[in-house]
Structures are given as structure tokens and as C-alpha cells.
Image (cartoon, helix red, strand yellow):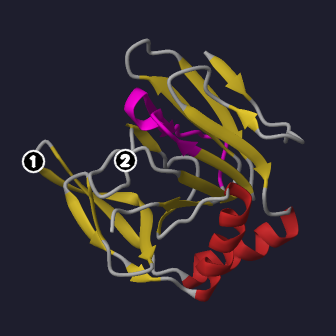
Amino acid sequence: MNDLFSEIESEPLSVLPYDGDVTYFGHLIQPEQSHIYLHHLLNEIDWQYDQAVIFGKHIITKRKVAWYAEQAFRYTYSKTTKIAKLWTPLLLEIKEQVERETQEQYNSCLLNLYHDGSEGMSWHSDAERELVEQGVIASLSFGAKRKFSFKHKHTKETHSVELDSGSLLVMKGVTQHHWLHSLPTTKKVGTPRINLTFRQIRT
């Protein structure tokens, strides 16, 4: 296992050695502004408990989510469908900064709220049919620093990076085809983390 723990690099860091394109940009948003964004996101976003259907059983998670976009896009994952709310001024402000850094355009954002380290995300890939094939997903983190891991679907090789508050990670190309990713749980984190994943939905 290779861990790329997080002294923020002056240059973007390539996370995967093959079969994918994942870049860690380090701090996009500086600490003071990150703290302000975290506060507003916690209080202004319409958070809902996430839901999934697993082996025919309806599950409601401790983690909360929100789905925003430029129009009322439908997005189905874990056998449940969400209908997007329209961008808020705050999300548009953040999106513009992400687009400027990545030189890409995004028409939607799935937000995740993890209240503490007991909440995470199991291994999965973002390959839902609504997403642009081999499109770009830009992941911006606020709050607690958390490890983010990748596992190759065939070789089972793993790589991890710690995502600091205000940091940006970008996945694109064939990454979702060859790699799974996860947010492991940990007993070491007792504060919340919000993750904004800006996405490209088919129109």
C-alpha cells in the first residue's frame, strides 16, 4: 500500500501510477476562507440523510447529502434517485474557483456531510449512466482532514492521499473504469467534513 500523506505540494501531485488520472492540487482555498465556507455550507445547504437499497433492503445512512445543479437533473445511485436543487450563490462562488483551477466546466455538484470519523464511504466507482463518460469529477474538501483511498479493480493495489480542508482532488479519464475509491472510517476524527464533488451530467 502506498500512502501519499499530505504535505501540500507546490505543484499538483499525480496520485495513481497507471490506468487512471487523479491529481491532488493541495490547497485551493486558504484556511481562514475554508473555515468560513464550512460554516455557511453546514447551515445553508438543504442536507438530507442519504438512502440506498442494498440486497433489497432500504437503508438510511448517518451521512447526509445534497444534490445541486444548473437545472433539475435526476441522478440515480445505490438504486435511489435524487432531483437536483438549483445552485445557491455560495455554491456558484465556489464552483467558479474550481472551474478556474481545473479549466473544466461543471453543471452539478453532489455534496457529502460526514459528521465525524465514524462516517465514511465504502469502495465504489462513480460510473452512473447520467455522468459524462470519462468526464471530470472535482472534489473539494472542507473541515476535518481525512484519508481518501483508491484500489485497482484487478490488481487490488491501493494508494491513498490525505485531503486537507480547502484542498482539491480531480479524477478524470479512465479512472472510474479501473479504480474504486473510498473514504475509510477512523476513530481519530471527531469533527465534521464536507466534500463537494463537482460533476458533469449528460444533457
Q: Quadrant of residue 77?
A: bottom left
Q: Amino acid at mark 2?
A: Glu
Query: Which one is nearer the viewer's eye here, 20 or 26?
Result: 20
Residue 94 is situated, as x and y percent measured from the top left of the image, at 67, 73
- Direction left: furthest residue: 56
Residue 56 to residue 28: above or below: above
The quadrant of the rendering that contains the C terminus is bottom left
Q: Quadrant of residue 98?
A: bottom right
Rounded to the nearest angstrom, the CA distance separating label 2 from label 1 is 28 Å
The quadrant of the rendering that contains the N terminus is top right
Name the residue beneath numbered marker 2. 133
* In-image side of 51 versus 135 (left or right): left
10 Å crowding of disc 2: few (<14), some (14-19), many (20+): some
Mark sitting earlier along the chain (2/1)? 1
Q: Amino acid at mark 1?
A: Gly
Residue beneath the point at 61% across and 80% down: 92
Residue 120 to residue 138: above or below: above
Q: Does 122 lie within the magenta span?
A: no
